[in-house]
Amino acid sequence: MRMRTSTTWMAALMSFGAGWVGAHAAANRADEAAPGTYISASEVREAVGHLPPDPVGDAALRTLRIGHYNVSIAVVRRALVDGRLPTDAIVHDKVAEVYQISEGSGTLVTGGRLLDGKPLPANHPVVRHVAGPSAVGTRIDGGTAQHVGPGDLVVIPPNTPHGFVQLDGDRIVYTLVRIDAEGVLTVVPN
């Protein structure tokens, strides 16, 4: 079963493939699967520049319906607050995530057990528009710690606790592909 699930996620990612780039930064718009979707590096930089000054900024660039999958492309920035990294321990029940680090570096923990996990309410914006049903906790017990930096890719299956536990500088920026096989994310028409 695990091999089939991994194969399904990889097939979704591969079908998304070479065309996974393009869009207006602040727009969370939906496109029916076109021959490809292009997001330029300048659009990604613009999106990062427009993120609010919060410790975590997450801007969807596109939300696409590709066959039976909803696929969201976003840019995320995590930053220190007064020299400290805010708590980052979350699990998404139905959505897989693929990170590609573009700026900064740090230690990401995946797997293990979410401690003091509390489900986000069904009407919470993270649940409705960002990552589907999710729970946040105080930290992750166990798991695998991996140092990540520019160019690195991380694939996080559904139901996998994850979070950054340390940043090497004042922030880390990464593009993020969310793969939703169950249609829990809202696809917003143009």
Image (cartoon, grey):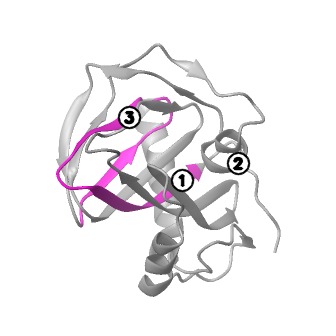
* Residue at mark 3 to residue at mark 1: CA–CA distance: 14 Å
Which mark is drawn over residue 178?
1
- Between circles 3 and 1, the one closer to the viewer is 3
Helix, strand or loop for disc 3:
strand
- Of mark 2 and mark 3, the one earlier in the sequence is 3
Report the residue marked by disc 2.
185
Q: Which residues, given as a range, are shown in magenta? A: 151-179
* Residue at mark 2 to residue at mark 3: CA–CA distance: 19 Å
State whether residue 25 is above or below residue 187. below
Contact? badges 1 and 2 (CB < 8 Å): yes
- Residue name at image x 37 percent, y 61 percent: 174
Could you say which is closer to the camera, residue 137 or residue 148? 137
Report the residue marked by disc 3.
162
Residue 179, image x, y percentages: 56, 52
State whether residue 65 is above or below residue 97. below
Residue 183, image x, y percentages: 72, 46
- Residue name at image x 19 percent, y 41 percent: 146
The quadrant of the image that shows the C terminus is bottom right
Quarter of the image for residue 113 reads: top left
